[in-house]
Image (cartoon, helix red, strand yellow):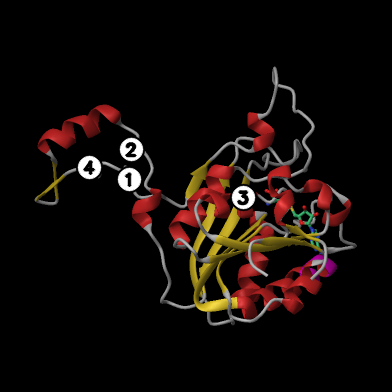
């Protein structure tokens, strides 16, 4: 079953996936923002029913030391946290993705240019490689100086890490919609909401080891599977619309479960 993306409904897929086999899940589900038919629910209750149902099933598929990331709006993520709070999970972070692009241009409130990502582990014992995802320090000149002589901090001499600083929970990564603009104009994309590769790469490097199995539910373009493959991890996923999938994954598609 591994290293395949199944073209089917998420519930059909999850029902057939064996329990406790996933090391890391990166899940980018519908947001109920009505950006496509698959993102349109009758009302909030219907959306939450759908979301809680796939979450409940996904939890069964996780290994006891596995971890997972879930994308959504800040508001929906708050509701998801409320749902997940009684599941005996280890909540790690409410990550803010500052995407430099708005989800709405309403003039009656502040423009939304963030999305949220919930980062959980199934228990307190989980893998996290903070050194793999260090990011560059902001002040180059100060760091250059510190690298030579160190900086005195709380009575101790501190030297910068050559790989950069530890990654914070606010991620400033341009959305593809933003980076693909030509002369300020948004270009039509094959998928309405693809996630940037560097963001997925960060999650995979931080929360999995080589040969681990990564779950790519609601695969869309299949960026999670593509990055898993690139980083020598195994993947398994599902997507209902074959047209969205990146052509580099065409050999990894499966039409039947
Ligand atoms: C937010 S998008 C994922 C985008 C993806 N992360 C990417 O970067 O390309 C959600 C995807 O879920 C798929 N989808 C929605 N409902 C589904 C369902 N019930 N079963 C399987 N796939 C579904 C949609 O076709 C859509 O491509």
Q: Nearer the viewer, mark 3 or mark 4?
A: 3
Q: Name which quarter of the figure residue 60 lies in.
A: bottom right
Mark 3 highlights which residue?
226
Badge 4 or badge 1: first in the primary sequence: 4
Mark 2 residue CB less than 8 A from any atom of ligand 1: no
Q: Earlier in the sequence, mark 3 or mark 1?
A: 1
- Rounded to the nearest angstrom, the CA distance separating label 2 from label 3 is 29 Å
Q: Which mark is residue 137?
A: 2
Query: Does the segment drawn in magenta span residue 77?
Result: no
Which label's residue is closer to the chain start, 1 or 2? 2
Measure the C-alpha gap from mark 4 to mark 1. 8 Å
Query: Is residue 47 part of the magenta span, yes or no?
Result: yes
Question: How far apart are the two marked residues, 4 and 2, measured between alpha carbons?
Answer: 9 Å
**Can residue 57 be seen here?**
yes
Q: Marks 1 and 4: in contact by CB < 8 Å? A: yes
Residue 249 picture location, percent across and down: 70, 49
Secondary structure type for disc 3: helix
Query: Which residue is denoted by mark 4 in the rendering?
Result: 160
Report the quarter where the C terminus lies. bottom right
Mark 2 or mark 3, whichever is nearer to me: 3
Q: In this view, does 77 lie above or below 139?
A: below
Q: Do the residues under discs 3 and 4 have CB atoms within 8 angstroms?
A: no
Q: Position of residue 26 (x, y in %)?
A: 60, 60
For marks 3 and 4 on the same chain, the one whose residue lies earlier in the sequence: 4
Q: Mark 1 points at which residue?
A: 165
Q: In this view, does 120 lie to the left or right of 16?
A: left
- Please state the extent of the stretch shown in magenta in the rendering: 46-50
């Amino acid at each position: 079953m591994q290293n395949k993306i199944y073209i089917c409904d998420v519930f059909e897929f999850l029902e057939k996936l064996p329990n406790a086999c996933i090391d890391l899940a990166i899940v980018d589900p519908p947001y109920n923002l009505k950006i496509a038919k698959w993102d349109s629910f009758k009302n909030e209750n219907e959306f939450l029913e759908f979301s809680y149902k796939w979450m409940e099933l996904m939890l069964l598929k996780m290994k006891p030391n596995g971890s997972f990331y879930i994308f959504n709006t800040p508001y929906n993520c708050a509701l998801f946290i409320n749902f997940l709070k009684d599941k005996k999970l280890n909540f790690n972070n409410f990550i803010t993705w500052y995407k430099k692009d708005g989800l709405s241009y309403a003039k009656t409130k502040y423009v939304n240019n963030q999305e949220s990502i919930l980062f959980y582990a199934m228990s307190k014992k989980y893998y996290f490689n903070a050194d793999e995802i260090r990011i560059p320090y902001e002040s180059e000149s100060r760091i250059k100086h510190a690298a030579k002589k160190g900086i005195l901090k709380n009575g101790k001499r501190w030297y910068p890490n050559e790989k950069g600083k530890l990654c914070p929970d606010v991620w400033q990564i341009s959305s593809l919609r933003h980076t693909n603009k030509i002369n300020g104009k948004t270009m039509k994309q094959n998928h309405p909401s693809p996630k940037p590769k560097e963001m997925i790469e960060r999650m995979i490097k931080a929360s999995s080891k080589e040969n681990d199995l990564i779950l790519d539910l609601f695969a869309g373009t299949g960026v999670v599977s593509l990055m898993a493959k690139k980083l020598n991890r195994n993947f398994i996923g599902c997507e209902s619309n074959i047209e969205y999938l990146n052509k580099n994954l065409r050999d990894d598609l499966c039409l039947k479960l």
